[in-house]
Image: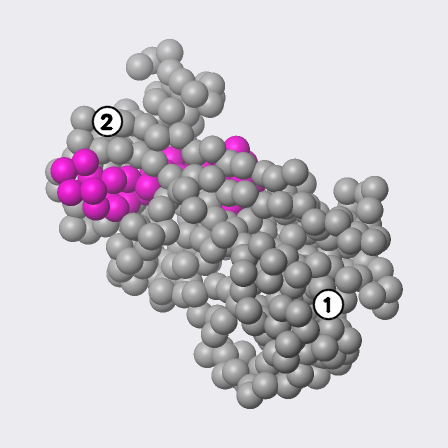
Amino acid sequence: MKITVDIPTLESERLILRAYDPARDFDRLAAFMATDKSRFFLGPLDRYGAWRLAATFVGHWVQRGFGLFAIEEKETGDFSGMAGPWAPETWPEPELAWFLTPDKEGRGYGTEAALCARSYIYDQLGWDNVASAIEPDNAASIKLAERMGARADYEHPLPKGGVVVYYRHPGPEAL
Amino acid sequence: MTPGMIHIPTLETERLTLRAPAARDLDPFAAFFASPENTQYLGGSKTKPETWRYLGEVIGHWAMRGFGRWIVCRKGSDTPVGLVGLHEPLDWPETEVGWYIWDGKGEGFATEAGAAARAWAYTTLGLTTLVSIITPGNSASIRVAEKMGATRAPDWDHPRHGALLVYRHPGPGGRI
């Protein structure tokens, strides 16, 4: 007997959302996790920590049946971030999470990837609503969530201190 | 490895089944890691959310490397008694065979499951050597390594945990 996890591939105009590929994605993931921007996404981490985190991304698919997709820029094939449904233990509810590597910002990729992942959540997973958990000083993600029609719903305390705000997205019926 | 695909085989020994770790293993796994006593040689206790993430890391390791660790159960039971197998995160010096047993200590489960993992590494992966990395003072684990025929090699300085004991296993066919 063996277990198999089959991570689908999604496509938008300029991006492919696919399974994390250690051979192609690790260096760029590790570079992102070394930046201060990764503080909103389980960082900062050294390369070793980034490797372990990447393993948890894949494990999450097995543990939950869904998880984060690697975002690939079609034009270059570059790993450009991650997006997808995310539900680590003890969080109040599953969320739609995302991050972009800093060199791919400013082109609307974050919104494009998050919209693609949200469609996957509604159409393939069949959820009737989803929120995104965002720290109050993560202005870029708040802007992105609001652009997608999400609105602040409630606060939840973080283990490291402070809070995270759940931004509730419009449900599938409102889209 | 095809990204997005993880293949974890099941191994059988005389008394044990080594199977893929799964989400349902969280509670026994978390109970083991919650105990400072159990984890005194394993980097200290973990909370349940930390253990959940660690279980994900154990599963994801298979995707990263094509090998990893198995949940060990008594044959005919699905209840985990330990985690045994191959381990090589990015900061590891080489491929390790390791064992955690939380139920049935003293029954030789670590040796039996460790030997099955080692045989799989040699026959299926074609590895030619393995080490076990053990925290000084973990005499139960040292006994397992010695029972498996492993011998002391130079210590490894772990960046956070300091000097760790390295035991090198006999290679395929029992070569030292």
Instruction: Residue under label 2, please give it.
Output: A12
Q: Position of residue B160 (x, y in %)?
A: 49, 77
Judge whether B22 appears above or below B148 on screen. Answer: above
Q: In this view of the protein, which residue sits in the foreground, B40 or A141?
A: B40
Kind of residue at disc 2: Ser
Chain ID of residue with mark 2:
A
Kind of residue at disc 1: Asn
Judge whether B95 appears above or below A113 on screen. Answer: below
Left or right of B72? Residue B77 is right
- Which color scheme does this rendered protein use? one colour
Helix, strand or loop for disc 1: loop
Q: Which residues are magenta?
A: A59-87
Q: Residue shown at 15%/42% (left/top)? A: A76
Q: Position of residue B66 (x, y in %)?
A: 50, 52
Q: Position of residue A37 (x, y in %)?
A: 27, 55
Left or right of B117? Residue A54 is left
Q: Residue shown at 64%/76% (left/top)? A: B175
Confirm whether the magenta stretch covers residue A60: yes
Confirm whether the magenta stretch covers residue B93: no
Q: In this view of the protein, which residue sits in the foreground, A54 or B62?
A: B62
Q: Residues within 10 Å of mark 1 (few under 14, many from 20)?
A: some
Point out the image quarter for the C terminus of chain B.
bottom right
Q: Position of residue A85 (x, y in %)?
A: 42, 34
Q: Find the distance from the CA under tag 2 to the CA under tag 1.
A: 48 Å
> Furthest-front residue in view?
B173
